[in-house]
Amino acid sequence: MQLLGLAVIGALGFVSWDIVSDIKSEIKSEIADSIDKEIKAKRAEITERVAET
């Protein structure tokens, strides 16, 4: 019985860690996408300013 309890706790821990890992991955992806958008906007702004000079 004690072994079964340890197995259940271990499985729950693994599932929880997998969920946390997925969330972290999604957050990193959203941050990277946001940064890419900002970089593209700045590049366009710089290109426009250079073209004006």
Image: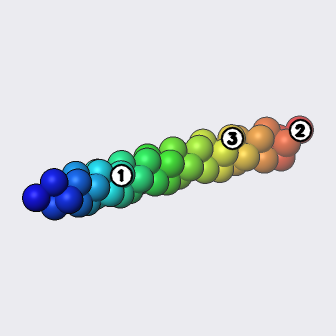
* Callout 1–callout 2 Cβ contact below 8 Å: no
**Residue name at image x 85 percent, y 42 percent:** 50
Reading the image, the residue beneath label 3 is: 42
- What distance separates the C-alpha of mark 3 from that of mark 2? 17 Å
Q: Is residue 17 left or right of residue 32?
A: left
**Residue name at image x 78 percent, y 47 percent:** 47
- Please state which of the two labelled residues, at mark 1 or mark 3, is closer to the viewer: 1
Q: Which mark is residue 41?
A: none
Circle 3 packing at 10 Å, graded few (<14), some (14-19), many (20+), is few
Element class at badge 1: helix
Element class at badge 2: loop
Q: Which mark is residue 53?
A: 2
Whether residue 12 appears in this view of the structure is: no
Q: Position of residue 48 (x, y in %)?
A: 75, 44
* Callout 1–callout 3 Cβ contact below 8 Å: no
Q: Is residue 32 left or right of residue 18?
A: right
| 46 over 5 or under it: above or below | above
| 43 over 7 or under it: above or below | above
